[in-house]
Image (cartoon, grey):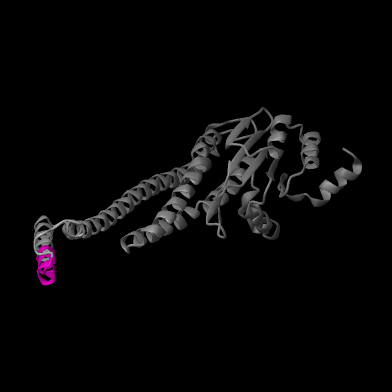
């Protein structure tokens, strides 16, 4: 890396230094940034390639001198009503917390800006070691991002109202969107339960040395598990609403088919009589127009009466 490139990286790099701890934030990572990290911290090339390559599943890679975490935090796209899952790559050393973003994670950048402006907030987060600093960052991100689950619950309640208000088509589309968003969050949250649990029980000479951080990461794990249960309940509710909506649609369809069948049966005798009198053969009463109309009227009234009796007795409509 040239001196000029290094200078450009240091100029644009976001940095907070407090109590001998450093938080570096790369809001839009580039290849030059990863080269700087390799030269400065000697991170593994595979970890750095993960920062630039395709999005990875949540994971934690443990080395002697640092941890590498990949996490996802859900974000609602209001324009398309779909949940986005920007990933956040984190390097943690004895003295540095390094957050790497491919696309902006709004809650993280907001927290970083708050720490730059708030000295009292820095004194709370930058206390003794980077493990507690990591806890405060993750705690903030999970509480802010998983609040989206409450929004999805409100949407599910609205879908339920639409189903029982006979808005089946609208509810069908909303159920599909709700199910997709639920599955998206569950897909990223499930593996992160293992990641947080690993951090909670991991001990190094520079990370959670005396087990002091275990309770902090257990607190995050409890919050994640609680939201996992909410997502499971939400999935069951969506599935139940889908079945209810399908049953109502089937019931309305059957009602329509019943009505159409009644009309078909009602005109069948008249169609049969029309076919007889339309043939080029001699038939009784064919010379008496009034008699023919009387036969048709009698047949129609008799058919309607029989249909009415059967339908009402069987309670088909």
Which residue does the image show at 9% across and 66% down from the upper left?
A: 298
The chief SS type of the magenta part is: helix
Which residue does the image show at 60% across and 48% down from the upper left?
A: 137
Which residue does the image show at 65% across and 48% down from the upper left?
A: 126
Range of residues picked out in magenta: 287-300
Residues 306 and 244: in front is: 306
Residue placed furthest toward the bottom: 290
Which residue does the image show at 68% across and 38% down from the upper left?
A: 91
Q: Position of residue 39 (x, y in %)?
A: 81, 34
Residues 313 and 20: in front is: 313
The verdict on residue 131 being magenta is no
Total of numbered circles in the picture?
0
Q: In what quadrant of the picture does the N terminus appear?
A: top right
Kindly indicate the quadrant of the structure image that contains residue 131: top right
79 with respect to 9 (left or right): left
46 with respect to 233 (left or right): right
Q: Is residue 114 above or below residue 32?
A: below
Q: In what quadrant of the picture does the C terminus appear?
A: bottom left
Residue placed furthest toward the right: 3
Q: Position of residue 78 (x, y in %)?
A: 55, 59
Residue placed furthest toward the top: 64
The verdict on residue 292 being magenta is yes
69 with respect to 41 (left or right): left
Q: Position of residue 24 (x, y in %)?
A: 72, 46
Kindly indicate the quadrant of the structure image that contains residue 110: bottom right
Q: Position of residue 303 (x, y in %)?
A: 12, 61
Answer yes or no: is residue 129 visible.
no
280 with respect to 149 (left or right): left
């Amino acid at each position: 890396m040239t001196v000029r490139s290094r200078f450009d990286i240091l100029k644009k790099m976001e940095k907070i230094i407090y109590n001998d701890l450093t938080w570096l934030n790369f809001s839009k990572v580039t290849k030059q940034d990863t080269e700087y990290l390799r030269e400065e911290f000697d991170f593994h090339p595979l970890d750095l390639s993960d920062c630039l390559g395709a999005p990875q599943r949540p994971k934690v890679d443990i080395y002697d001198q640092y941890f590498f975490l990949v996490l996802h935090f859900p974000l609602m796209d209001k324009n398309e009503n779909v949940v986005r899952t920007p990933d956040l790559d984190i390097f943690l050393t004895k003295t540095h917390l390094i957050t790497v973003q491919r696309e902006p994670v709004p809650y993280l950048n907001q927290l970083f800006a708050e720490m730059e402006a708030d000295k009292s907030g820095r004194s709370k987060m930058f206390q003794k070691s980077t493990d507690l600093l990591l806890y405060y960052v993750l705690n903030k991100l999970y509480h802010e991002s998983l609040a989206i689950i409450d929004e999805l619950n409100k949407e599910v309640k609205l879908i339920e109202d639409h189903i029982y208000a006979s808005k089946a088509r609208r509810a069908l589309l909303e159920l599909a969107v709700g199910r997709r968003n639920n599955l998206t969050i569950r897909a990223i949250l499930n593996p992160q339960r293992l990641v947080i649990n690993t951090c909670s029980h991991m001990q190094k000479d520079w990370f959670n040395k005396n087990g002091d951080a275990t309770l902090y990461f257990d607190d995050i794990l409890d919050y994640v598990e609680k939201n996992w249960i909410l997502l499971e309940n939400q999935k069951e509710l969506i599935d139940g609403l889908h079945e209810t909506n399908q049953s109502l649609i089937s019931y309305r369809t059957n009602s329509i088919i019943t009505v159409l069948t009644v009309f078909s049966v009602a005109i069948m005798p008249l169609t049969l009589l029309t076919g007889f009198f339309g043939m080029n053969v001699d038939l009784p009463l064919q010379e008496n127009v009034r008699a023919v109309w009387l036969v048709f009227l009698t047949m129609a009234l008799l058919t309607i009466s029989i249909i009415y009796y059967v339908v009402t007795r069987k309670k088909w409509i």
